[in-house]
Amino acid sequence: MNDDKRTILVRYDEIGLKGRNRKYFEKALLKNIKRALPSDSAIEYRIPRGRILIDLSSEIAEKYGDCLQNIPGIASYSIGVSIDPDFDQMAELGIQWIEPLLIGKDQLNFCVRTRRSEKTFPKTSTEINFEVGSRIMSKLGPKGLNVDIKNSDFTLEIEIGENEILIFHNREPGLCGLPVGSSGNILCMLSGGIDSPVAAYLMACRGCRVHFVFFDNQPFLGRGGYEKVKKLAKIINGYQGRAKLFVVPFQDIQMSIRDHCKEENRIVLYRRMMYRIADKIAKDQEMPGLVTGESLGQVASQTLENLAAVTCVTTMNILRPLIGMNKESIIKLARKIGTYDVSVEPQPDCCSVFMPANPSTRGKIHLLEYDEKKIPLEQLEEEALKNMETMKVDFL
């Protein structure tokens, strides 16, 4: 056993079900892990079947292990010690970890769990559990240690691999899902509110690299919304790495709709124009899908009729991961991923400009199309795309 070395054992679940394509997903996950960790020649990576192993020094293991918590595709990870196939050594390491926990306690429940991926090892998992557990109990049983498989306070885990044995006692949860990039690139309509950043995060956890489009109206709303969206994009990029942000000037379109179209139709007409422009950006960037933060029935523009009215202007895949979620669940997830505090900063979004007193909740497509004939739709769209700002956004 080398006290100066540690091995981080990275587990995945969904990737393991991919059959012949598993190697592709493993390579994508390993690439994302390498991107998240520093480029250090002292860090070595290995991929035995069903696992990713990261060898590094004990000094940096905890620090770098924390970086793995925000990488989609990882089910859990543990920081372990590579050890000889010797039951006495395994038990001694367990005793080192458990004995300090007994101080000031009358009783501590523990158990040993073994996973034996290398079936040629001469002992079964049950036999290994007994051999190691009995040695620990003989030393610490008199001090209050008790075996309890179902309600253990401390679980000593042993992983029997092909060329080594790892022993550890910590399982840190990951985000699960699929590695970013394995499902392709998509474009998220990022508003600056609570919902759309959560939608982007959920799609990143499904293996998408999410890029962003923001419809800006600085003449009426100032620069606050622009800066807010950049902050939100950086937070989401903490889960996926670098992405593009497209900032589309939207004020001319909104003023034209305000001046020529029916007041109650404004919000749906705004959304139809946003969808058209996002469609063109996504196709130009070879992104096969659009993501929105729409949730059914949450606001007037998100009724079934209005969702149908905006969807029909594009042939793109429209992905709405929040469609069946309530606001409380969305807020809870926004807090968890770190976007909530930025989202609730007092800065109105683009759709709040020229808000009608009674917005339409059941927009009729033929009436919306009739309204759109009153404005130079293609010209406005072309001007917005011509003046669009494109930037690469890093992460916080």
Image (cartoon, grey):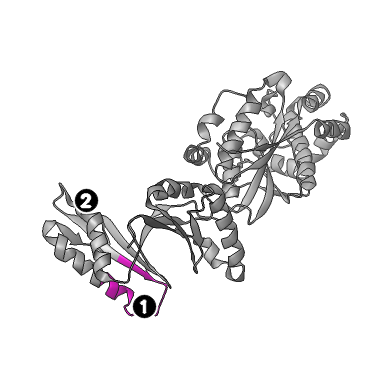
Residue 357 falls left or right of residue 285: left
291 or 302, which is in the foreground? Answer: 291
Residue 8: image location, x then y, percent? 43, 57
Residue 200 position, x and y percent, is: 61, 43
Of tags 1 and 2, the one toward the viewer is 1
| 302 and 1: which is toward the camera | 1
Q: Report the amino acid beneath label 1.
A: Phe
Residue 327 horizontal side relative to residue 130, left or right: right
Q: Report if residue 79 is visible in the image.
A: no
SS at circle 1 = loop
Q: In x, y percent, where is residue 54?
A: 46, 58
Residue depicted at 77% across the width and 42% down the height? 281
Residue at 60% in and 49% down: 203
Q: Nearer the viewer, residue 64 or 242?
A: 64
Answer above or below: position of 11 versus 39: below
Q: Quarter of the image containing the N terminus?
A: bottom left
Residue carrying label 2: 101
Report the span colored magenta.
113-130
Sequence-wise first label, 1 or 2:
2
Badge 2 crowding class, 10 Å Cα cut-off, few under 14, some 14 to 19, many 20 or more, is some
**The C terminus: image quadrant:** top right
Marks 1/2: CA–CA distance: 31 Å
Residue 157 seen by the camera: yes
Identify the element where label 2 is drawn. helix
Give the residue pinned by disc 1.
121
Q: Is residue 197 magenta?
A: no
Is residue 118 within the magenta segment?
yes
* Residue 30 picture location, percent across and down: 55, 57
- Among the 4 quarters of the image, the one containing residue 385: top right
**Circle 1 Cα neighbour tier, 10 Å, few/some/many (<14 / 14–19 / ≥20):** few
